[in-house]
Amino acid sequence: MDLRVNRRWAGWRQQLDGLRTNIMTLKRFFTLGLGLAGLALVAALPAPAENKIPEDCKAGGFFIGCQAYTFNRFTVFEAIEKTAAAGGRVIEFFPGQKLSKEEPTVSWDHNASPETVQKVKDKLAKHHVHAANYGVVGIPKDEAQARKIFEFAKAMGLRAITTESVDAIDTIEKLVKEFDIMVGFHDHPRQARNPNYKMWDPEYILSVVKDRDHRIGSCADTGHWVRSNLKPVDCLRILKGRIISSHLKDLDKMGDGHDMPFGTGVSDVPAILDELKAQGFTGNISIEYEYNWDNSVTDVAQCIGFVRGYGAGKK
């Protein structure tokens, strides 16, 4: 046989070996009694990220803490302190917050110096808070610029990045694979004056992520779905298997409402938690409390206490 035939034969052999491996894997699943349902469940779960959130950061069965934007009238250091005071063990940073009272001119984002990054890490360690996420941040199409965000996430040990930069999806997917860091597409409310804004629609987000790497999915902002007159549980089911993280909110009414402590509004937080649990959700839940801005620690603590109580009730 000539060289071309040898190459073709080698390629066929490789494909045949791969097929045999897949058949054996299927047999193992059926032997274990998982069947097609088990295969569907495995296919639905996101690929594991390298920077998993430590198990001791859980409360009520979930990795729950704060989106630092809850404390945007304060500094990064104060946001960490307030998250810890409310009982949160994880935090999601956002770009542009001032670092500390001691350094009010220093902004915290993915352009931070190594010295600033270390200061934030030290502050997190002091208060036993884990940095899990970063956003909402614009990710450029330009790979060199986008890479800065992923390098920052890697340096901070983050699990995921939150964005709405659909136009950069090709760049995002490339860097997700390279860095093994997840990306969740965030939803803001429907904009009556801007019909071109589609992120409020879970069907649209699904269309963006469904054929992409499984580490790309949704940052499910339940409060903004309520503000768009959508039921959060329905939205979560549409995005099943693609929920990377969540901004969990409970609002006082459908439509243009404001945040309330969990369990006192219309969002049906227990049903949301039930659905996340059923989906095998392993990401962080960020309480983004956009009300009572100057004195929200007690309200946030009530939210975390609600989730803790939810978990206790399920045991």
Image: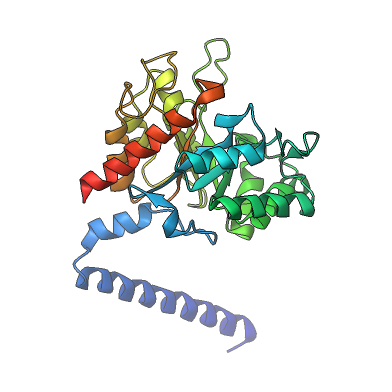
Q: Residue furthest top?
A: 193
Residue at x 32%, y 32% (from the top left corner)? 269
**Above or below: residue 190 compared with residue 43:** above
The front one of 135 and 104 is 104
Residue 120 shown left or right of residue 39 in the figure: right
Q: Position of residue 20 (x, y in %)?
A: 36, 77
Which image quarter: residue 114? bottom right
Residue at x 35%, y 38% (from the top left corner)? 305
- Is any atom of residue 162 visible in this view? no
The front one of 100 and 147 is 100
- Is any atom of residue 215 visible in this view? yes
Residue at x 47%, y 44% (from the top left corner)? 88
Residue 37 shown left or right of residue 302 in the figure: left
Q: Position of residue 54 (x, y in %)?
A: 47, 59
Q: Position of residue 236 (x, y in %)?
A: 36, 36
Colour scheme of the rendered structure:
rainbow
Residue at x 31%, y 21% (from the top left corner)? 266
Q: Position of residue 265 (x, y in %)?
A: 33, 21
The front one of 24 and 267 is 267
Residue 152 shown left or right of residue 18 in the figure: right
How many numbered discs, if any?
0
**Above or below: residue 64 compared with residue 198:** below
Q: Is the N terminus in the top left, top right, bottom left or bottom right quadrant?
A: bottom right
